[in-house]
Amino acid sequence: MRFNEKYHLTYCTNIHAGGNWEETFDSLKQHLPQIKKAVCPDQPFGLGLRLGNRASLELGQGHLQDFKEWLNHEDCYIFTMNGFPYGNFHGEPVKDKVHVPDWTTPERLDYTLRLFKQLDVLAPEGMECGISTSPVSYKHWFDSKTKMQQALVKGAKNMVRVAVELYQMEKTSGRYMHLDVEPEPDGFLENTPEVLDFYSKYLVPEAIEAFTEFQMTKEQASELLKRYITVCYDVCHFALAYEAPNLTFEKLKEAKIKIGKIQVSAALKIMYDHEKADEIWNTLAQFNEPVYLHQVTELVNGKVKTYNDLPMVLERKAPFTELRSHFHVPIFLKDYGLLHSTQDQIEGVLAYLENHLVSHHIEVETYTWDVLPNDLKLPITESIARELNWMKSRLR
């Protein structure tokens, strides 16, 4: 949905089951009309579509125009996609497989380019569009800095190939689309310094080489690279990096790096209380589930320490001051009994947006409804509508 011609606000359909196209479409038909009715019954409703590789392949086998007609009939449109999870995202352990295949592979490149071509067909004519994606790869798969650097080089080369394709597509059709790289804990890119480093050491040099065939200066190649390769700012992920939104936004702006999409999400925040320690650990244990990675971060002497999954912290039960866990909890709640959320980080983003246009795309991304503790579960359409209406009230 639109806000003052500035923002498209939506939710990400990675919350719904969608292993193949039939399952994906069935989920949309079941939930989308109800959500639209509860959120914006009298205006077009924008959608953040998640297509896994299999669903994308099947969509391209004669279903694309039918899907577009269905969207038009429902008064809905697509302006952004989530191209991060390539495979299954529900009903079985995902954990670090969410990064498979990573950006060093042709499979990731082919999948992403296919998504852009499908998005170009599905989105309204002339509308800016974007696709969020993995932060290159997963750090724990590499046992040396040399191997990580080699992966960064290869990943940058593949991402720049996307940038070149998007440049050529825009020249042909006039459609502006961007690839939104999404930093997250234990990804190759976790925080602002790592994003800046990836651009300056890997993406820009590769772009200067790749865009030479178009007879461009180094400055023009760098500018184009930053037009087509942008950042997906996931509020939960940057909260886990203990970075204030305004500082991140200002540093990226200074480097002329654009934010293609803001994903609105909240992490678990755990404040230590010696007298209630057992209760706190028992409550936190309710969030320990086997499907997704729930990294935990702690600020120690000014540096962020990351535990690569929640069980590591639950086994130690060591005293702490504050922990944050990568568990996307409902954005409209500040507290969960003895636990809290990083909703204040969302409020910080919204405060900054009052005076700065950071991105045209805002997507609520709470995908963990199926694995939340039972007392936090509500019917899925009701939960999504509640989050979107909460965001509508804040954006106004």
Image (cartoon, rainbow, N blue to C red):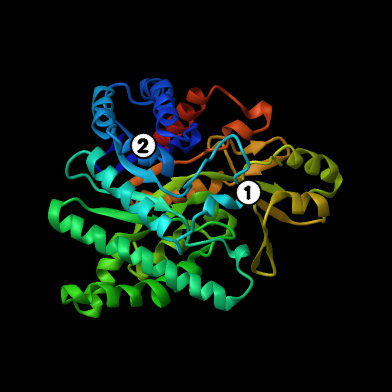
Per the rendering, the mark at residue 58 is: 2
Dot 1 lies on which element? loop
170 and 158: which one is in front?
158
Quarter location, residue 363? top left
Query: Residue 140: percent from the left, percent from the top?
Result: 63, 63
Q: With respect to residue 71, does 394 lie above or below?
A: below
Residue 7, position as x, y percentages in the image:
31, 43
Q: Tell me the quarter of the picture where residue 45 sits.
A: top left
Please state the horizontal and vertical placement of residue 158, each as a whole percent of the image: 37, 65
Q: Which residue is mark 1?
A: 293
Residue type pointed to by label 2 = Glu
Name which residue lies at 22% across and 74% down.
220
Q: Is residue 59 above or below residue 213?
A: above
Residue positioned 25% across, 22% down in the render: 73
- Relative horizontal placement of residue 49, taking residue 285 as reference (left or right): left
Residue 360 seen in this snapshot: no
Q: Where is residue 167, by image quadrant? A: bottom left
Eyeballing the image, is 322 above or below 205?
A: above
